[in-house]
């Protein structure tokens, strides 16, 4: 059953439409930043908000309109107004019969107008600045998403690399178990080995087969997660290149102080982390919006000018112009106070979110550093344990061949060596992920 499952999983991995591409961690991060759907949607969202901000920035620019209207009427008042507008009034037009029952008259009016809002009290300017601050915040949100994606890709890529290296360990263990079982069958047939020992070796080989099957399933899952983050198309597969040793500058991870506020990484992180910058831009936008809303009851002033061309025939007509200004104030607006309350609440929310974001940075950096220190210590211990367990297995095998150790001793030592090798892989992966977690918390490490 286990052999069939191994063959099924292996066949599934080999059935891809295209051969897998071996990819390094840096290549995986670069690929994710240009192909991941979350990043692409964040970029489009930023463009959308920038378009809104651009529209708000142009709200004080003059608006130019043009219109043309043709009509025909025999309404006395409209006919007389048409003659007056086109400067075609004659003495006979004042005859009562002409005034009371005029002939139908066609009229063409062409008008060009220009209108501009005057931001006398600064309300529009604050709304424009708030829109720009919001747009800047979405840019930082996109940068923060990239940073989060980098961390997720690092975790997924590391998991995929560890899964394949663990599978190599399982394959080697299966090969050794099969070889030992074959020798045991020959010795059992010769009567040199007890059948109970042969059965124990066979059980251990089956256990290794099960480990390999689980390893194959883990590889498939890890590869699928990596492909998802990299925006892989159907049939496209990526294989993580092997893990490398992580050399960490001691000064970066040394615990300089037990107080988070004194951490040397906190200040630079607060200045460059996209999440903090985005929260600050949202607070700025909320302040400007609240200030603009407080001025919403002040007069609105609009200046404008019109140029008109009125004619009843294409050959004759008259042009006229007008200039003026409009001051409009809303004496009662039932929605004004709810809008102001909403703006104040939005401002308080932005203040709380900024404080929470900054507090999270101050707490995250020391915690991430301690995690990295612990991971490095665990990796160093696991690496030593792997070397010791391999040597112990070699000694036990020699002693068993010499009749000084039992099969139980060898099997238990072999299991310990396997666990040690897997533990070393896991702690090495944890170190890579912990380094990336500290880098993300501090806004990048050199």
Image: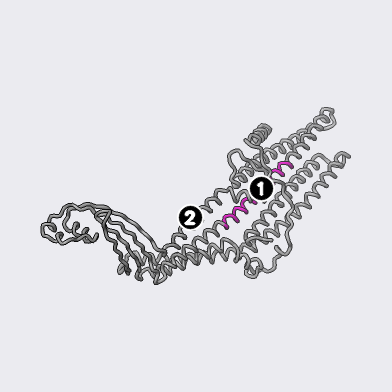
Which SS type dominates the magenta stretch?
A: helix
Residue position for label 1: 159
At horizontal 56% and vertical 63% (from top left) the residue drawn is 276
Comparing 439 with 30, the one in front is: 30
What number is the disc on residue 137?
none
Instruction: Give the percent coordinates (x, y) of residue 43.
Output: 53, 53
The reply to whether the magenta stretch includes residue 141 is: no
Residues rendered magenta in the picture: 143-168
* Quadrant of the frame with the C terminus: bottom right
Comparing 403 with 424, the one in front is: 424
Instruction: Give the percent coordinates (x, y) of residue 104.
Output: 18, 52
> SS class of the residue under badge 1?
helix
Instruction: Give the percent coordinates (x, y) of residue 207.
Output: 71, 38
Crowd rating for badge 2 (residues with CA inside 10 Å; few <14, some 14–19, many 20+)? some
* Quadrant of the frame with the N terminus: top right
Comparing 45 with 353, the one in front is: 45
Q: What is the distance, in whole Å, between disc 1 and disc 2 at their CAs?
A: 36 Å
Q: Nearer the viewer, mark 1 or mark 2?
A: 2
**Which quadrant of the figure has residue 59?**
bottom left
**Which quadrant of the figure has residue 116?**
bottom left
Of labels 1 and 2, earlier in sequence is: 2
Crowd rating for badge 1 (residues with CA inside 10 Å; few <14, some 14–19, many 20+)? many
The reply to whether the magenta stretch includes residue 161 is: yes
In this rendering, position of residue 255 left or right of residue 338: right
What number is the disc on residue 48?
2
Q: Residue furthest right?
A: 402
At horizontal 73% and vertical 40% (from top left) the residue drawn is 170
Q: Are marks 1 and 2 in contact (CB under 8 Å)?
A: no
Instruction: Give the percent coordinates (x, y) of residue 148.
Output: 59, 55
């Amino acid at each position: 059953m286990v052999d069939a499952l191994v063959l099924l999983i292996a066949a599934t991995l080999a059935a891809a439409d295209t051969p897998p591409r071996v990819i390094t961690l840096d290549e995986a991060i670069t690929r994710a930043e240009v192909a991941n759907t979350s990043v692409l949607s964040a970029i489009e969202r930023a463009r959308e908000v920038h378009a809104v901000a651009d529209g708000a920035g142009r709200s004080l620019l003059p608006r130019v309109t043009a219109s043309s209207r043709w009509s025909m009427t025999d309404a006395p008042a409209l006919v007389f107004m048409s003659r007056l507008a086109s400067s075609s009034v004659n003495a006979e037009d004042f005859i009562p019969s002409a005034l009371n029952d005029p002939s139908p008259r066609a009229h063409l009016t062409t008008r060009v107008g220009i209108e501009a809002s005057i931001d006398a009290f600064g309300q529009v300017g604050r709304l424009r600045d708030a829109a720009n601050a919001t747009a800047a915040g979405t840019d930082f949100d996109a940068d923060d998403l990239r940073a989060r994606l980098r961390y997720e890709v690092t975790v997924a890529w590391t998991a995929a690399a560890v899964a394949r290296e663990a599978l190599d360990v399982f394959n080697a263990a299966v090969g050794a178990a099969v070889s030992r079982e074959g020798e045991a069958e020959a010795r059992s047939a010769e009567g040199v080995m007890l059948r109970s020992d042969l059965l124990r070796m066979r059980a251990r080989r089956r256990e290794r087969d099960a480990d390999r099957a689980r390893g194959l399933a883990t590889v498939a899952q890890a590869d699928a997660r990596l492909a998802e983050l990299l925006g892989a198309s159907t049939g496209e597969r990526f294989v993580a290149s092997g893990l490398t040793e992580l050399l960490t500058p001691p000064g970066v991870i040394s615990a300089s102080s037990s107080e988070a506020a004194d951490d040397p990484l906190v200040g630079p992180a607060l200045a460059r982390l996209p999440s903090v910058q985005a929260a600050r831009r949202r607070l700025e936008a909320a302040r400007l919006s609240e200030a603009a809303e407080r001025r919403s009851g002040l007069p609105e002033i609009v200046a404008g000018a019109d140029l008109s061309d009125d004619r009843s025939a294409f050959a004759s007509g008259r042009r006229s112009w007008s200039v003026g200004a409009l001051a409009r104030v809303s004496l009662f607006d039932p929605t004004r106070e709810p809008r102001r309350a909403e703006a104040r609440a939005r401002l308080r929310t932005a203040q709380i979110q900024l404080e929470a974001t900054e507090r999270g940075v101050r707490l995250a950096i020391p915690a991430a550093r301690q995690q990295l220190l612990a991971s490095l210590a665990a990796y160093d211990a696991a690496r030593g344990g792997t070397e010791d367990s391999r040597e112990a297995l070699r000694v036990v095998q020699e002693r068993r061949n010499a009749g000084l150790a039992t099969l139980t001793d060898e099997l238990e030592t072999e299991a310990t060596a396997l666990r040690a090798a897997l533990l070393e892989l896991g702690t090495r992966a944890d170190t890579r992920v912990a380094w990336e977690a500290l880098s993300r918390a501090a806004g990048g490490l050199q």
